Image: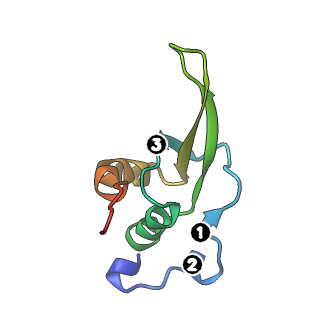
Amino acid sequence: MLAQGEANPLNVFGLRQLQHCPPHFDRFRFDLRAEEKTVTDWIYKNLSGRFYIGDEYHTDAETDQLIMSKTVAFERPYEITYFALHLDQINTSWQIF
């Protein structure tokens, strides 16, 4: 974890963020309000396992419409809980005038 000043071997070799979501990763779907880089920077700083972030299409049960949401998935199950608890602080849109 970068916040603790330790070098993560997965970061060193560029293996933390995956371009595909393996089936054994735990997924979490949310509406992105901040920039994706803000979310990934927080993950790199506060978590240590492999992760995936990308778009996911799903059907709304009430309206039967196709909706796109962001999906983040983690290899370590406890990291998804930590991420979900901090999402309201990470996923905010700030406008500076």
CB-based contact (under 8 Å), mark 3 and mark 2: no
When asked about the image quadrant of residue 11, the answer is: bottom right
- Distance between mark 3 and mark 1 Cα atoms: 23 Å
How many neighbours does mark 1 have within 10 angstroms: few (below 14), some (14-19), or many (20 or more)? some
Q: Which residue is mark 1?
A: 16
Q: Which residue is mark 3?
A: 31
Q: What amino acid is labelled 3 in the image?
A: Asp
Residue at the image point whose x is 36% and y is 56% from the top = 93
How many neighbours does mark 2 have within 10 angstroms: few (below 14), some (14-19), or many (20 or more)? some
CB-based contact (under 8 Å), mark 3 and mark 1: no
In the figure, is residue 96 to the left or right of 31?
Answer: left
Q: Nearer the viewer, residue 69 or 79?
A: 69
Q: Position of residue 37 (x, y in %)?
A: 50, 67
Q: Quadrant of the N terminus?
A: bottom left
Q: What amino acid is labelled 1 in the image?
A: Arg
Q: Tell which tag, 3 or 2, sits nearer the viewer.
A: 3
Res. 53 mark: none
Mark nearer the N terminus (3 vs 2): 2
Q: Position of residue 18 (x, y in %)?
A: 66, 61
In the figure, is residue 62 to the left or right of 6?
Answer: right
